[in-house]
Amino acid sequence: MVCYMDKGVPEVRSKPDVDDLVIVSVSALADAFFEGIDAFLVDLFSNKEKAAIAEERLKELMQEHSREDK
């Protein structure tokens, strides 16, 4: 079972020998998520072949609309 807490020290708490409970800091989880995205994008765009494929896929994934479009 995974439970979430606002902030904590340590950021992840677990006692696997007692139960299957893991408590995770939401702010630490968000930080780790965005750091992972940053590292992935740097790695991805450092390879020209992968970067070209990613550019095309991102055009479909991300769209922008102005208020006037609605």
Image (cartoon, rainbow, N blue to C red):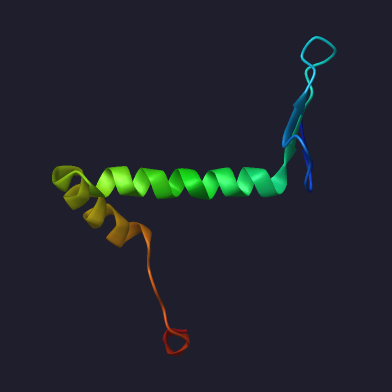
Residue 28 falls in image quadrant: top right
Farthest residue, direction right: 18
Residue 1 visible, this angle: no
Residue 48 visible, this angle: yes
In the image, residue 19 lies at what x, y percent?
A: 83, 15
Farthest residue, direction left: 49
Residue under the point 77% across and 28% down: 13
Relative to residue 34, is residue 60 drawn left or right? left
Picture layout, residue 12 above or below residue 46: above
Q: Nearer the viewer, residue 68 or 45?
A: 45
How many badges with numbers are in the image?
A: 0
In the image, residue 46 lies at what x, y percent?
A: 22, 46
In the image, residue 59 lies at what x, y percent?
A: 28, 61
Position of the N terminus by quadrant: top right
Farthest residue, direction front: 9
In the image, residue 67 lies at what x, y percent?
A: 48, 86
Q: Nearer the viewer, residue 45 or 59?
A: 45
Picture layout, residue 17 above or below residue 39: above
Residue 43 falls in image quadrant: top left
Residue under the point 77% across and 46% down: 7
